[in-house]
Amino acid sequence: MQKRWGNEYLVANNEQYSIKFMHLKKGKQHHLKYHNEKTETLFVVKGSGFIVHDGLFHTIKQGDTVTILPKDIHKLWCSKKEDLYVLEINCPSSEESVCLEI
C-alpha cells in the first residue's frame, strides 16, 4: 500500500500478530503517534534513520531492533542519504494508532 512516506506491505496477519514490511523514502517520516494496546517491534533490514521514542532521539541502522510498548510515543524518520527498510511486528494484530500530528 502506498503511503505519503513510501510503501507498506502486509506480510502476515492473524489475531495474535501482524508483520509489515515498510519502505521509507529518503527524508520521509511517519506521524508522531502511540498505540493503546499493541506492542510494536521494529527491525531495520536495510538503511538508516532516526526514531523518537518517549522523548529520546535515537539513530537506527541495519540490524537494529526497537520495541515500542503500549502508550509509548514514537516517530520514525528515514535519513536523507538512503531509503530505510523496516519489518514491523505488532502484537496483538491491530491497526489502532493515535496520531499526535498530521
Image (cartoon, rainbow, N blue to C red):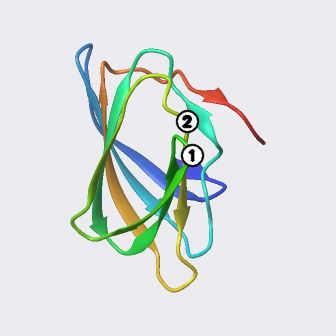
Name the residue: 39% across, 47% down. 9
* Quadrant of res 19: top left
Name the residue: 48% across, 24% down. 95
Callout 2 crowding tier (Cα within 10 Å): few <14, some 14–19, many ≥20: some
Q: Which SS class for mark 2?
A: loop
Q: Toward the viewer: 55 or 7?
A: 55
Residue 14: x, y in percent?
Answer: 25, 19
Residue placed under numbered mark 2 in the picture:
73
Is 38 rendered above or below residue 25?
A: above
In screen coordinates, is 11 left or right of 53? left
Q: Nearer the viewer, mark 1 or mark 2?
A: 1
The kind of residue tagged 1 is Gly
Q: Which SS class for mark 1?
A: loop
Query: Are the two marked residues, 1 and 2, in contact with CB atoms closer than 8 angstroms?
Result: yes
Q: CA distance from mark 1 to mark 2?
A: 8 Å
Disc assigned to residue 64: none
Which quadrant is home to the C terminus? top right
Disc assigned to residue 55: 1
Residue 31: x, y in percent?
Answer: 65, 45
Is 41 rendered above or below residue 24?
A: above
The residue positioned farthest toward the front in the image shown: 56
Name the residue: 46% across, 75% down. 83
| Earlier residue among tags 1 and 2 | 1
The kind of residue tagged 2 is Ile
In screen coordinates, is 41 left or right of 74? left
